[in-house]
Image (tube, helix red, strand yellow):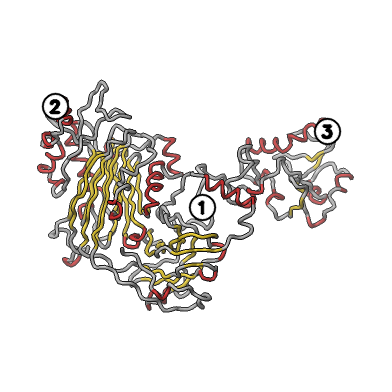
Amino acid sequence: RCSPRRSPATTSRPGPAPRPGLPACPKRCPASSSLAGGITVVTWNVGTAMPPNDVTSLLHLNTGETNDVDVIAIGLQEVNSKINKRLKDALFTDQWSELFMDVLSPFHFVLVSTVRMQGVILLVFAKYYHLPFLQDIQTDCTRTGLGGYWGNKGGVSVRLSIFGHMVCFLNCHLPAHLEKAEQRKEDFATILHMQQFEGRAASGILDHDLVFWFGDLNFRIESLDIRFVKYAIDSNILSQLWEKDQLNIAKSTWPVLSGFQEGPLNFPPTFKFDVGTNKYDSSAKKRKPAWTDRILWKIKSPSVGLGVGGRRPSRGVLSVSQLCYCSHMEYTVSDHKPVAAIFAVQFASKADKPPVEIYVADEWSRPEQAVVRYKMAVGFHRSSWDWIGLYRVGFRHPKDYVSYVWARSDDGERCLEKQLCAQVMFSEEALPKGKGEYILGYYSNTSSSIAGVTEPFQISLPRSEEGSSPTDSSGSSSEEEDDSTLVLLAPKSRSPSPGKMKRHRSRSPSLAKFQGLILRPSSRDRGTSRSPSPQSRRGLPGDIPTIHLPQEEQGRCGGKAKEPGRAADSQEGSSFYKTVREQGGPRRVSADNPLARADPRNLGLLPALRLEMIDQAMGQRRESVDQGYPCQRMSPTSPLGCSTSPREGSSP
């Protein structure tokens, strides 16, 4: 495999951290000059259904074929895109993408790129040690529904350079019905024309060295009666249906399909089934079975698409052979059956080293050993926003890190110019406690991809006493039980802030942190909080805190009546402390604490919510007001802490 390996010079247990400077880089292990890679392509019209419990057989993960697969492309159509689902999916990862990441991450597949256009989704995964050799990643989408204004039909694509060869994955959902064959042709031509990528290597889809075209292409079987079609399927004489398949006819008559290849259709038509069964359409419409879900590929001819100066932009010529082309009848959640194809791709040549090589010790058993040295290749476009992430083995996507450190070495430019090693170090607070296998990855902000990775190494740091306290253990157990959605950041985001990308995240969007606002936990959440902050794990007091203001603060409020007894209770002077009731008794809170500045006017909330908050805060005191006892008046329109007698001011 093509991952940069640690040389023997870095495998021994290091001593103290090396002094800052420009340490010499150990030698890089040689890489092979050719690669035979495996690519799996899956297409499935899911019919707005919920994901099934398992997709292992669909991805051929329960066979030995997965060991030779390096890239997996998954195209989905008709994913539920109703307004409520789209709003939720805009905030969080959709359930289908979440399912495939969960299933593929244990097999060391990482999400490289994803693109969505309403119900059409394309996901591209790759083995983690291939990530540095996947560069120039771009996406595009083209709407063809309602004359190009609606995205229920159209195409989405992901293009990338794989070992120096330009490859494009195109997932399409074309118009339905038997008589719309010409419309499908026009829409496909529109997609090819509209989708353009940056760079001179391959600006159009057909300029790529290898194109995979798949999806619900909606081609039907012409001329034959539905009874004969079903008879041919039951009798397993599918070859008699091939010559009437619209796509097979179009491949020999449409110039736009020239050069596209497809394996034999040795599986039954994948449309249309009664949902939940393997029976073809039994409704009143009785649609004729058809091979609507297809996977094709095209290799660019060596004589076309020459680069600047007559040179080919990519390295050598590809050879592709299809190993498997089948449908999966075991999935019944949709009226379509999913289709999968496995390809063996022989790359004539490949990049011999990654853009960034990272060197690390075999084990980090002490914080001072968390030293990372990296070397950037000539021509690498470094950025001050590049960072090195620490990932658990089995991470799901490039932002699914445990911690990170900015790759901002003081000698970064000098290291790049003189091909020397730069050095950074993880802080003790950023390191995970306990034992486990981890991987380091250099994330390039310029290319929005990982430019270098290490092989797995061990981290075995002792757990702190605080981390093993009962409070923290209960919080961690609740986090482990949380199987909530992982939020994917935008591809162009530089990096999330440290500590905000935890392994488990809530499905609900977090509330804005208004200054001084304290929310009571619900009865369901009072046992153990899922929040990672220590304050939330301690639990909030059961009642609204009582705030005592000093006399001089009341004077500034301009209150009309001041009672001697109340002024005597406020002899705090300039220190200005508040007393807060808690479960364990009163404690003193400094004025700098946000709790001390809990002024409803500063919250920026709607008036109705402000009144509700004040009502909750004063609910327990209304009885005392009715009985004539003195109290402080709190109102959204009056200064906080101005005291009046019950007769002078009305309750909120």
Quick one: label 3 or label 1, which is nearer the N terminus?
A: 1
Q: Say if residue 191 shows up in the picture.
A: no
Query: Of discs 3 and 2, which sits in the foreground?
Result: 2
The Cα atoms of the two marked residues, 2 and 1, are separated by 57 Å
**Answer yes or no: do the residues labelled 3 and 2 have beta carbons within 8 Å?**
no
Under tag 2, what secondary structure? helix
Q: Nearer the viewer, residue 550 or 262?
A: 262
Location of residue 22 in the rendering, given as x and y in whole percent from the top left corner: 45, 78
Image mark for residue 228? 2
224 relative to 613, above or below: above
Assign the C terminus to one quadrant of the image.
top right
Location of residue 608 in the rendering, given as x and y in whole percent from the top left corner: 63, 35
287 relative to 92, above or below: above
Query: Of discs 3 and 1, which sits in the foreground?
Result: 1
Q: Which residue is mark 1?
A: 502
Q: Amino acid at mark 3?
A: Arg
**Residue at horizontal 51 percent and vertical 66 percent from the top:** 426
The Cα atoms of the two marked residues, 3 and 2, are separated by 93 Å
Location of residue 50 in the rendering, given as x and y in whole percent from the top left corner: 39, 35
Q: Is residue 621 left or right of residue 312?
A: right
Quick one: label 2 or label 1, which is nearer the N terminus?
A: 2
Q: Is residue 648 left or right of residue 488?
A: right
Q: Which residue is mark 3?
A: 647
Query: Of discs 2 and 1, which sits in the foreground?
Result: 2
Q: Amino acid at mark 2?
A: Phe
Q: Residue furthest top?
A: 284
Assign the N terminus to one quadrant of the image.
bottom left
Quick one: label 3 or label 2, which is nearer the N terminus?
A: 2
**Residue at horizontal 51 percent and vertical 60 percent from the top:** 435
Mark 2 neighbour class, 10 Å CA radius: few under 14, some 14 to 19, many 20 or more: few
Q: Residue furthest right?
A: 564
**Residue at horizontal 49 percent and vertical 44 percent from the top:** 483
